[in-house]
Image (spheres, grey):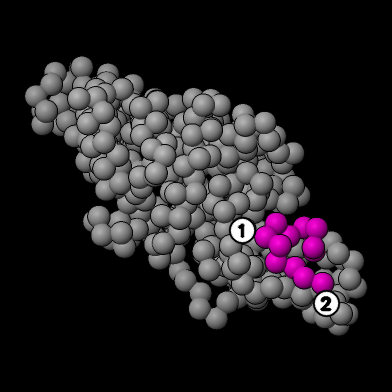
């Protein structure tokens, strides 16, 4: 009976926007059994993707309101469902596994979970790579586009965050996971930003600390100096910004192995090198995380299909030989993250 519950939960999670594919090994079922009790699994499947107060869920399911409120809050604290707030009112909803439940496990992740997720990542990663609308995108480091005449605000990191009323910073779960697996990264770990509803969720769950705009800008400078790739949610009103490295980030690590990572990463910019100004110093080669720089006869060049437009190569070029240029077909992101996942749901045929 319990196994049937988890089978139905797997199917339910797969019906959410980002999906939850099955695997030959069944590791996805092991993850569900680790995270959810049978009772929590059953309740999750009775929730909707529309935020509801505990009183509404209780009335719908015929359960005492106080009991339902306590149960839903406990599940939110475990990162199994998503909670939003309007004043003192709390609203709960079922939420996708990634971006979602996986990231919400930041306070709870252990080596066992890390090992299971590492095994599962290729399957869910390929599933996500098949939709037209990605959940995250790459924007260039701001210092790399200072000379660019016009850059839309949704491609400038400081413009994205300066209007945010609530900002939280957390550890990067990818780097935490790799450390648990014995692959500690030398990049800074506390550089995962969330905003609005997502910031409130992380703060309520003790998974981050609130910061002001000044510290946010300072930490973004730390990310740039550390050579990290900026991946905000694929939305004009940003919900989160990940500062990523290809040794830890599951998505980037997987895309780097592809012949043309640019086919899988949403970005409106690409790097170009002026051969006349290039001195073959190799700094761009060392800075690039996507192996998108190649040595030429007289100068280095950019492999177009591998460049994801992060701008890391621009910052260290001593002769300013590298510039970020706008792609011919730029794409304006969805309004907010909820619209992003709605689009993904439509593309997967589950909305």
As for residue 293 lying within the magenta part, the answer is: yes
Residue under the image location 49 percent in, 45 percent down = 121
Q: Is residue 322 magenta?
A: no
The image position of residue 258, as x and y in percent, is 58, 62
Position of residue 70 relative to residue 57, above or below, is: above
* Secondary structure category for the residue under label 2: loop
| Residue 31: x %, y % from top left | 41, 32
Q: Residue at x 90, y 73 (%)?
A: 279
The residues tagged by marks 1 and 2 sit, at their Cα atoms, a distance apart of: 22 Å
Which is more toward the observer, 105 or 215? Answer: 105
The answer to whether one can see residue 187 in this image is yes
Image x and y of residue 267, in percent = 55, 66
The residue at 30%/59% (across/down) is 348
Q: Which residue is mark 2?
A: 296
Residue at the spot 31% in from the left edge and 22% down from the top edge: 37
Residues in magenta? 284-296
Q: Secondary structure beneath disc 1?
A: loop
Of 187 and 148, nearer the camera is 187
**Residue 98's quadrant in the figure?**
top left
Numbered disc in front, either 1 or 2? 1
Q: In this rendered view, identify the residue nearer to me: 114 or 100.
A: 114
Mark carried by residue 84: none
The x and y percentages for residue 315 are 77, 61
Q: Quadrant of the N terminus?
A: top left
| Direction front: furthest residue | 24
| 133 relative to 71 in the view: left or right | right
Disc 1 marks which residue? Answer: 257
In the image, is 62 to the left or to the right of 168?
A: left
> How many residues crowd around disc 1 within 10 Å: few (fewer than 14), some, or many (20 or more)?
few
Judged left or right of residue 142, residue 10 is left
């Amino acid at each position: 009976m319990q196994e049937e519950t988890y089978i139905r939960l797997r199917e339910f999670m797969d019906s959410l926007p980002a999906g939850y594919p099955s695997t030959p090994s069944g590791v996805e079922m092991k993850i569900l059994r680790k995270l959810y009790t049978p009772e929590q699994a059953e309740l999750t499947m009775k929730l909707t993707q529309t935020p509801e107060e505990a009183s509404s869920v209780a009335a719908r399911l015929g359960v005492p309101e106080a009991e339902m409120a306590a149960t839903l809050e406990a599940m939110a604290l475990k990162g199994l469902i998503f909670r939003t707030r309007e004043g003192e009112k709390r609203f709960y909803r079922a939420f996708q596994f990634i971006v979602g439940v996986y990231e919400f496990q930041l306070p709870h992740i252990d080596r066992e979970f890390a090992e299971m997720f590492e095994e599962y990542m290729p399957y869910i990663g390929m599933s996500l790579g098949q939709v037209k609308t990605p959940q995250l995108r790459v924007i260039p480091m701001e210092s790399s586009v200072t000379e660019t005449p016009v850059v839309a605000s949704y491609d400038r990191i400081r413009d994205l965050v300066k209007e945010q009323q609530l900002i939280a910073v957390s550890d990067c779960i990818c780097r935490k996971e790799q450390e648990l697996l014995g692959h500690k990264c030398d990049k800074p770990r506390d550089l995962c930003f969330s905003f609005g509803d997502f910031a409130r969720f992380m703060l309520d769950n003790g998974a981050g600390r609130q910061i002001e705009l000044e510290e946010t800008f300072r930490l973004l400078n730390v990310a740039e100096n550390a050579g990290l790739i900026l991946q905000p949610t694929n939305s004009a009103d940003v919900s989160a910004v990940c500062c990523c490295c290809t040794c830890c980030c599951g998505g980037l690590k997987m895309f780097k192995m592809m012949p043309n990572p640019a086919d899988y990463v949403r970005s409106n910019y690409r790097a170009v090198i002026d051969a006349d100004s290039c001195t073959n110093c190799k700094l761009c080669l060392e800075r690039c995380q996507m192996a998108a720089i190649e040595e030429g006869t007289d100068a280095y060049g950019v492999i177009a299909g591998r460049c994801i437009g992060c701008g890391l190569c621009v910052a260290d070029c001593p002769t300013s030989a590298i510039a970020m240029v706008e792609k011919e077909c730029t794409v304006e992101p969805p309004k907010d993250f909820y619209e992003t996942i709605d689009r993904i749901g439509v593309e997967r045929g589950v909305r």
